[in-house]
């Protein structure tokens, strides 16, 4: 790690395969400020980026361009989807009155946005609309995460001489491309990790209860929409969560509520809300919660959430992505367990996917099973399933290293935070957070082959913006939004996500002086050296500032 980072701004973090999902945002804090002020202009300069932030170059520069050339759309744009269900959801999004911000964006008229169907190697759907309306429709690509993948594009680009348009009604999806042997193998792999060192040894999970999606956000969005279609009820997000989860629940469905602190006091407020809703005959369809939550690693009391969900007949959906299956076992508490397998499960930052798993012991199981089976459309492309299955074979070994590296860095930074003269103010991680007692309750027991830990993600909070900038500029690791990758990544989460809404973020404990870190697989001592250098530089900035 002592070698200076040489990756150029906007390039994928090494080893940078064709399907890399990372982007190096540059070493300097000034790039954070630029992103906070105008993220779209910064993302436009990235040569590689997370696939939901912007379509992969194989999709945007080749497959989409071929579609637009076919339809004669010089002033048109399009997004590509693997199923008619997702394409129709895109249409509904673009024409919804919720797209009207009252200033410079208006929903599209129905005549402005259409679905066209094509076949190359595989069938796919194109949602076509005027290019000047892209800002209105773009949110559907970036939030739900249900578009075609880069591997889909790569496979189909080899058959462009065969590409033809077909009637939408004639589209026949080859099921083996989305739910074949590779997908079954992946489900069996997931089952093996769910069953390993379980807190509920008598639990039985069927492969048929594991639903695969083309992204982690899709594994939230799709089940959310299944329930919206069935119940038309309110969705509750309890505790802070990844920004796109907040957006998805706000923008899709009739109503949402946000209890962003995830504290015991908010549990009382949630209970009062559920009581009032029941008294007024208002349907609450689901409570969603991250365990632990992004980016401050708060672990809400999911035991009490389970009690409330049962008492008020509400679905409890738990996102355990950061804790991860190897470390924690929360399936028995959830009605639906969602996980982004893009992160530490896949582990190599080169494929995206997600899962939603139904708890067969849940009192809501039979109701949810009927809803899921009626609406689920397989959309995880074959080659993505193959890549994730292959990469996940060393999941336990990688997770062990991620856990130990994170623990070592957190112990060092925590010792700094305990020094009143240090620039380090606080560390946010389940092992040191007060809410960590809830996390520990659901840690899997240790086995000869694996000792559970607290995951690869923590946030470090500094004294002020001057020390934050200095720490960030002197931290010789890649700066990227991803987590669970082989390389350690730092991300100025609050500044980049809520740079124009800092007052809103502050009420939930999110500060611009916090840096989220996802540790990688590097040598532990070398990794610690990089953090010591950054801390020492920040300490000097503190002393200068105090003179």
Image (cartoon, rainbow, N blue to C red):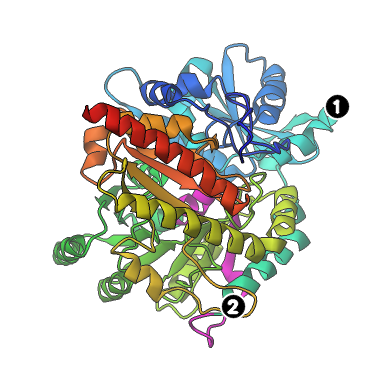
Q: In the drawing, does residue 93 fall left or right of residue 51?
A: left
The image quarter in which residue 22 lies: top right
User: Residue 273 at what x, y percent from top left?
Assistant: 17, 61
Report the disc number at residue 161: 1
User: Quadrant where the N terminus lies?
Assistant: top right
Q: Earlier in the sequence, mark 2 or mark 1?
A: 1
- Outermost residue toward the top in this view: 74
- Outermost residue toward the bottom in this view: 202
Q: In the drawing, does residue 464 fall left or right of residue 36?
A: left
- Queried whether the magenta region covers residue 185, the answer comes back as no
Name above or below for residue 127 compared with residue 73.
below
Name above or below for residue 8 compared with residue 443.
above
Q: Residues within 10 Å of mark 1 (few under 14, many from 20)?
A: few
Q: Residue at x 28, y 18 (%)?
A: 103
Q: Residue at x 47, y 38 (%)?
A: 533
Give the magenta range: 198-225
Q: Residue at x 40, y 61 (%)?
A: 291
The image quarter in which residue 274 lies: bottom left
User: Label 2 to label 1, Cα distance in Å?
Assistant: 47 Å
Q: Residue at x 58, y 24 (%)?
A: 9
Q: Are the two marked residues, 2 and 1, in contact with CB atoms closer than 8 angstroms? A: no
Residue tagged 2? 195
């Amino acid at each position: 790690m002592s070698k200076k980072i040489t990756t150029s701004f906007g390039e994928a973090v090494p080893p940078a395969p064709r399907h890399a999902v990372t982007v190096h945002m540059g070493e300097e804090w000034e790039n954070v400020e630029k992103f906070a002020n105008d993220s779209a202009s910064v993302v436009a300069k990235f040569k590689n980026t997370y696939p939901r932030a912007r379509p992969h170059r194989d999709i945007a520069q080749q497959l989409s361009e071929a579609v637009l050339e076919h339809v004669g759309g010089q002033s048109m744009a399009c997004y590509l989807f693997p199923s008619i269900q997702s394409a129709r959801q895109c249409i509904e999004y673009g024409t919804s009155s919720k797209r009207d911000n009252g200033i410079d964006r208006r929903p599209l008229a129905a005549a402005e946005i259409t679905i066209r169907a094509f076949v190359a190697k595989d069938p796919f759907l194109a949602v076509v609309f005027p290019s000047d309306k892209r800002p209105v429709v773009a949110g559907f690509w970036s939030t739900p995460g249900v578009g075609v993948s880069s591997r889909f594009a790569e496979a189909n680009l080899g058959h462009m001489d065969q590409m033809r348009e077909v009637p939408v009604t004639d589209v026949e999806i080859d099921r083996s491309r989305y739910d074949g042997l590779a997908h079954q193998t992946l489900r069996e792999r997931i089952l093996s990790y769910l069953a390993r060192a379980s807190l509920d040894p008598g639990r039985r999970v069927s492969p048929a209860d594991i639903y695969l999606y083309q992204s982690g956000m899709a594994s939230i969005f799709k089940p959310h929409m299944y329930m919206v279609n069935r119940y038309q009820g309110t969705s509750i997000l309890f505790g802070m969560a990844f920004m796109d989860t907040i957006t998805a629940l706000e923008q899709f469905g009739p109503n949402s509520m946000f209890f962003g602190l995830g504290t015991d006091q908010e549990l009382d407020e949630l209970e009062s809300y559920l009581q009032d809703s029941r008294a007024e005959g208002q349907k609450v369809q689901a409570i969603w919660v991250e365990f632990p939550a992004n980016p401050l690693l708060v672990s809400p009391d999911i035991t009490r959430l389970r009690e409330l969900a049962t008492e008020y007949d509400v679905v409890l959906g738990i996102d355990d992505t950061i804790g991860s299956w190897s470390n924690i076992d929360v399936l028995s508490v959830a009605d639906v367990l969602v996980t982004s397998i893009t992160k530490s499960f896949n582990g190599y930052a080169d494929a995206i996917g997600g899962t939603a798993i139904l708890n067969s012991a849940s009192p809501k199981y039979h109701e949810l099973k009927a809803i899921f089976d009626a609406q689920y459309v397989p959309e995880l492309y074959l080659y993505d399933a193959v890549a994730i299955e292959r990469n996940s074979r060393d999941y336990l070994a990688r997770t062990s290293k991620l856990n130990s590296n994170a623990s070592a860095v957190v112990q060092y930074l925590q010792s700094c935070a305990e020094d009143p003269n240090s620039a380090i103010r606080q560390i946010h991680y389940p092992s040191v957070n007060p809410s960590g007692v809830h996390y520990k309750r659901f840690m899997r027991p240790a086995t000869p082959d694996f000792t559970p830990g607290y995951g690869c993600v923590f946030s470090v909070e500094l004294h002020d913006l001057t020390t934050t900038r200095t720490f960030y500029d002197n931290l010789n690791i890649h700066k990227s939004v991803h987590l669970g990758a082989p390389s350690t990544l730092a991300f100025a989460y609050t500044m980049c996500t809520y740079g124009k809404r800092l007052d809103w973020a502050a009420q939930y404990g999110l500060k611009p002086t916090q840096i989220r870190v996802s540790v990688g697989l590097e040598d532990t001592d070398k990794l610690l050296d990089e953090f010591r250098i950054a801390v020492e530089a920040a300490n000097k900035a503190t002393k200068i500032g105090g003179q």
